Amino acid sequence: MRVNPAIAIDDAIVERGYEQRQQAAVLGCDQPEVSALANPRLAGFCVGRLTELLAALDRDVAVGIRQAQRQGSFRARDLHAA
């Protein structure tokens, strides 16, 4: 669940053409944190933190919850690719 937001963050960084130091200043974090996102080493990031970073990059985040089609089933849908 953390990979897609991390990819969206990295895409936004590349899109802006910033170096990691510049992007860290925009995001309010340090350069190693930006590097971790770009590589992606996500162990230190929760979904909430990734959502905050996406908001700092002017990205909307949508989380959907619905009744499962089958009892006990789990399905994650990638809205980024849609």
Image (cartoon, rainbow, N blue to C red):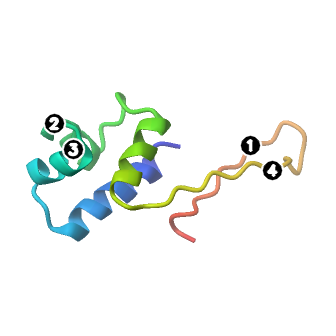
Kind of residue sitting beneath label 1? Phe
Helix, strand or loop at label 2? It is helix
Helix, strand or loop at label 3? It is helix
Q: Label 4: which residue?
A: 66
Q: Label 1: which residue?
A: 74
Kind of residue sitting beneath label 3? Val
Q: Marks 4 and 2, how far apart in space?
A: 37 Å
Q: Marks 3 and 1, how far apart in space?
A: 31 Å
In-front residue for pair 10/73: 10
Q: Residue furthest top?
A: 44
Tell me the mark number nearer the camera, choosing from 2 and 1: 2
Q: Which mark is residue 32?
A: 2
- Location of the C terminus (image quadrant): bottom right
Q: Marks 1 and 4, how far apart in space?
A: 11 Å
Tell me the mark number nearer the camera, choosing from 3 and 1: 3
Q: Residue at x 46, y 53 (%)?
A: 4
Q: Is residue 33 above or below residue 23?
A: above
Report crowding for label 4: few under 14, some 14 to 19, many 20 or more residues within 10 A (C-alpha).
few
Q: Position of residue 45 (x, y in %)?
A: 38, 33
Q: Label 3: which residue?
A: 34
Q: In the rendered image, which quarter is residue 29 located in?
A: top left
In-front residue for pair 7/16: 16
Q: Marks 2 and 1, how far apart in space?
A: 34 Å
Q: Position of residue 35 (x, y in %)?
A: 18, 43
Kind of residue sitting beneath label 2? Pro
Q: Residue at x 53, y 43 (%)?
A: 1
Callout 2–callout 3 Cβ contact below 8 Å: yes
Kind of residue sitting beneath label 4? Arg
Helix, strand or loop at label 4? It is loop
| Mark before the other along the chain sequence, 4 or 2 | 2
| Mark before the other along the chain sequence, 3 or 1 | 3
76 vs 18, left or right, is: right
